[in-house]
Image (cartoon, helix red, strand yellow):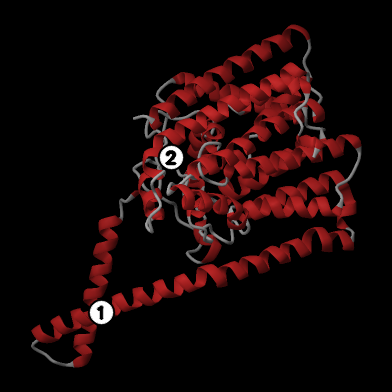
Amino acid sequence: MNIFRIRKEERLPATVALLVVILLNALVIYKYNSVFIHNTGDDYWQVFLRYFHISGYDPITYSVVTGWTVQYNVYRHPLLAFMMYPLYLINYGLMSITGLNFSQYIVASILILSAFYSFIFIRRIFRDVICLSNIDSTLLATMFFSFAYIIVSITVPDHFSLSMFVIIFTLYISGVKIRNHTEFKRWQSVILFLASAGITLNNGAKVLLSVLFANGKKIFRPLNILLIVILPIIFLWLFCSYEYKTYILPGEELRNIAKAQQIKNEKDSIYRIVSDTASDKDSVKIANAVKLVMKHRAHAIYMATIHEPWRQKGKPITNNGFLSWTDTTTSRTGTIVENLFGESIQLHKDHLLEDVLYFNRPIIVKYHSIISYLVESIIILLFITGIWFGRSNRFLWLCMSCFAIDMLLHLGLGFGINEIYIMGPHWLFVVPIAIAYFIKSLKGKTLYILRGLILAISCYLFIHNVWLYSEYLFK
């Protein structure tokens, strides 16, 4: 547990970071407290859903901590509901004593803790793994926490802040092992895999990559493949199946029965109307007429909702299974410019923090000011330059491999491409890590100029993003 102790050189930046994170979470609590603190009725989920709106983030964790159930998608977040169970017990005890719902405060405490240690460990990546100075390590950690969807994600009741912490923590351990030529023990690999994949399934691949880069070819030994890769994956899959059959399937079956009954009642009603008004009482003709009416009704419902925001998604590869979440038609160029390196890093003023699925936010929103595009261009240029200077470094290629996984999913297959920016905490760390290798290559006056540039960009981004975020919360 010594790894979680705050070092002497970290105390000042860590204290500042902690105060900022607490303040940002306090703003969100203040925004919703008057409604959520009294939200203890049976319709608590509907209340959370009706009032909580920050970008594409969901208030599922508030709901799970209020009345525990497996509410997350079990195949994407297989262990997350069970990780929240202790928080539910705490809140249940407080609700029993006070009659008030403290889910906001309890969830905020976890967000603050995970954000605080994300700051600590990404700073240690710069300090211990890349071997930058104390000043440069703090500067780049600050830059990372000035990005828009890092600021937002550490204050909302979703899984991204926890995911970010586990990924950064894993990368830090991997970097130290790569630098010291040591290896992951099997139990370490399994625990990190289950923690990461249990929160978000695809992030488990990043743990396996970390083990591969640290342990090298030894991971391909039959016993290692069995214990580190195959058995944990089988365990998660069996657990997902158990969750689905135990907690999800019964509810789906009841909803399907209710929906089928509703359709049957509607069809019977139409049949009676057609049968009473038809001059020809032939049963086949009446049945065909009923089918035609049902078809026209379905088309009318579709046309009435065709422009609804939740229909704003591109054409999937197929409409079945996981591939129904893909997107083959949304512009990749517009996504990269305005969302991937745009909204993820600096908020747009238009459609500020609106949800693509439930509000009228277009998938692609443009900035008004050329300054925004200038800042984005500088960040991308620094990112690419850093990759060039660190091109022979094993740890950087580990980080880039993790980045490639997300880009394959989001830009390649189109998973969540309409809201790619909310996934920023899963990959934005690669930007300052790459820039760190550019800093490491410089000395003298050029280094001071780059430091000044990064400081200026970080200050601009932090003021811009916090100002707009505060404006949104208090509008």
Q: Using the rendered image of the protein, determine whether residue 382 is visible from the camera's viewpoint.
A: no
Q: Nearer the viewer, residue 459 or 418?
A: 459
Quadrant assignment for the N terminus: top right
Q: Where is residue 127 in the image (x, y as percent from the top left)?
A: 78, 25
Assign the C terminus to one quadrant of the image. top left
Residue position marked by numbered label 2 in the rendering: 54
The picture quadrant where one finds residue 109 is: top right
Q: How crowded is mark 2: few (under 14 residues within 10 Å), some or many (20 or more)?
A: many
Sequence-wise, the earlier of marks 1 and 2 is 2
Q: Which of 188 and 40 is in front in this view?
A: 40
Task: Specify whether 79 is left or right of 55.
Answer: right
Q: In this view, does 251 lie to the left or right of 444?
A: left
Q: Which residue lies furthest to the top in this view?
A: 445
The label number, if any, that marks residue 265 in the structure image: 1
Q: Residue at 13% across / 92% down in the picture?
A: 281
The amino acid type of the residue labelled 1 equals Asn
The kind of residue on which mark 2 rests is: Ile
Residue furthest toward the front? 97
Q: Report which quarter residue 365 is drawn in.
A: top left
Instruction: Tell me: residue 239, above or below residue 133.
Output: below
Disc 2, SS:
loop
What residue is rendered at 50% in x and 24% in y?
Answer: 373
Q: Which mark is residue 295?
A: none
